[in-house]
Image: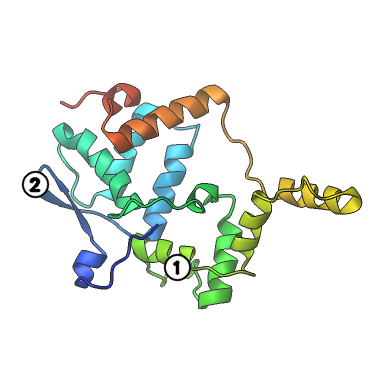
């Protein structure tokens, strides 16, 4: 997904604010913040009605008023998708929690970047640009290859070994079908302007 531009000033290429009904609100754009919030949205232990408010509290440096909550939630998803919103088939294969070890090792291998170093600061757009640039032979790219490996033409021991490797590369199923459907509905509403208030169980006051 092409989020990064080199033709604009840094504050435009790596924005640290969003606009809500014409008003500017500062945000925390670091990759750790976004990954934490994506994990929060997937956490079945947190009730849906609390997720949106927690997201706003952590993502926004200046908390928007209650009337702007739906816009603020949509702005978060617009932000993490980036301005181009191009389709990236690889992005849908990544589970940021399950694949954290492979992502970490790949950044160390290819870029010499230690994502666990407290001194490492990466804007979300920069992080995803580097993530998309990982080459063949890095742990993450290898895992994603195994995740979608077609084993139908393999036979015997080679087929069994490939199927085991493919199975081990799959992220665990964290939600029931009902929970997954509700999560998908919530995400869809937040991203596309649906009735997020009803799904989150609160009303803007």
88 left or right, relative to 189:
right
Expressed as whole percent of the image width and height from the top left, the position of residue 192 reads 29, 35
Front in this rendered view, residue 7 or 73: 7
Q: Quadrant of the C terminus?
A: top left
Expressed as whole percent of the image width and height from the top left, the position of residue 26 reads 19, 55
Dot 1: few (<14), some (14–19), or many (≥20) neighbours within 10 Å?
Answer: some
Determine the residue positioned at 69% across, 51% down: 149
**Which numbered disc, 1 or 2, marks the residue that appears first in the sequence?**
2
Q: Is residue 177 visible?
A: yes
Expressed as whole percent of the image width and height from the top left, the position of residue 8 reads 20, 70
144 left or right, relative to 47:
right
Q: Quadrant of the N terminus?
A: bottom left
Q: Is the image coloured rainbow, by chain, by secondary structure, or in one colour? A: rainbow
According to the picture, the residue beneath numbered tag 2 turns out to be 22
Determine the residue positioned at 35% across, 27% down: 49
Determine the residue positioned at 32% across, 38% down: 191
Q: CA distance from mark 1 to mark 2?
A: 31 Å
According to the picture, the residue beneath numbered tag 1 turns out to be 130
Front in this rendered view, residue 111 or 54: 111
């Amino acid at each position: 997904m092409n989020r990064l531009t080199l033709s604009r000033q840094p504050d435009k290429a790596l924005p640290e604010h969003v606009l809500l009904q014409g008003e500017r609100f500062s945000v925390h754009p670091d990759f750790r913040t976004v990954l934490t919030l994506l994990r929060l949205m997937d956490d079945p232990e947190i009730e849906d009605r609390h997720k949106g408010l927690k997201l706003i509290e952590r993502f926004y440096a200046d908390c928007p008023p209650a009337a702007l909550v739906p816009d603020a939630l949509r702005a978060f998803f617009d932000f993490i998708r980036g301005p181009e919103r191009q389709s990236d088939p690889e992005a849908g294969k990544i589970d940021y929690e399950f694949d954290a070890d492979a992502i970490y090792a790949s950044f160390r291998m290819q870029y010499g970047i230690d994502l666990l170093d407290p001194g490492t600061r990466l804007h979300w757009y920069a992080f995803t640009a580097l993530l998309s640039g990982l080459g063949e032979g890095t742990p993450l790219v290898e895992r994603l290859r195994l995740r979608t490996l077609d084993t139908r033409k393999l036979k015997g021991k080679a087929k069994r070994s490939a199927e085991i490797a493919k199975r081990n590369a799959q992220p665990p199923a964290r939600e029931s079908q009902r929970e997954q459907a509700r999560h998908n509905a919530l995400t869809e509403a937040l991203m596309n302007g649906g009735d997020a208030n009803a799904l989150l169980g609160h009303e803007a006051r």
